[in-house]
Amino acid sequence: MKPATGYNNRPTSDDPRDVEAWGLTEAARRLIHARQAPENPDLLRQALSLNQRLWTIFQTSMVDPECPLPKDIRDNVLALSIIVDRQTFDRLIDLDVNKLDRLIDINRAVATGLSQRPTASAASPTAPSASAAPQTAPMPKPQAPPPGAPGKLSISI
């Protein structure tokens, strides 16, 4: 029996940002693994399903009335999750492992952002929980390409 891989790197921190970053990194890792095994469509389906479940958790958190994040950040995460949903459903339909870059890039970029810590001057005793994003700059608004259009994800500031 082959041991599970990737779980040895689980975050040891209870910080929600670390857990979320780890989840996104793990989902990206599984998508990359699926891309490297195009002869195994079940591996791709499993990776896409994990990614979809993870982003559904983010969507649910963003619409929770008790979410501590500012409305503009919640709106941006929801907009990004719509892009992820569209890409995920498209990949579940055609199972083309060569079209996973967008999902992988989004997961990596968000994981990187979650891994960054606010500076000491930005932290205060009345600041929202650790899972709240730093308030130093607004998050760029993601722009989805038209359905069926090839290309990269563009983010306008």
Image (tube, rainbow, N blue to C red):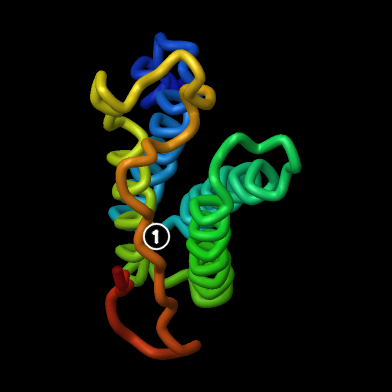
Q: Which amino acid type is marked by label 1?
A: Leu
Q: Is residue 2 visible?
A: no
Which of the two residues, 88 or 81, is positioned nearer the viewer here? Answer: 81
Give the residue drawn at x 34%, y 65%.
102
Q: Quadrant of residue 121?
A: top left
Nearer-the-camera pick, 15 or 56: 15
Q: Badge 1 is on which residue? A: 103
* Residue 132 at x, y percent in the picture: 48, 33
Q: Residues within 10 Å of mark 1 (few under 14, many from 20)?
A: many
Whether 67 is drawn above or below 106: the answer is: above
Q: Nearer the viewer, residue 11 or 139?
A: 139
Task: Indicate whether 23 appears above or below 78.
Answer: above
Residue 40 visible (yes or no): yes
Residue 133 point in image, percent of width and height: 42, 37
Q: Is residue 143 left or right of residue 101?
A: right
Quarter of the image with the C terminus in it: bottom left
Measured as percent of width and height from the top left, residue 140 is found at 35, 62
Give percent across and percent down for residue 145.
Answer: 41, 83
The residue depicted at 53 percent of the width and 75 percent of the height is 90
In this picture, is 13 found above or below 40? above
Which quarter of the picture shows residue 81? bottom right
Q: Residue at x 56, y 66 (%)?
A: 82
- The answer to whether 14 appears left or right of 98 in the picture is right
Residue 69, by quadrant, is: top right
User: What's the residue at 37%, 54% (across, down)?
Assistant: 138
Q: Is residue 38 left or right of residue 68?
A: left
The vertical placement of 8 against 63, above or below, is: above
Dot 1 falls on a residue whose secondary structure is helix
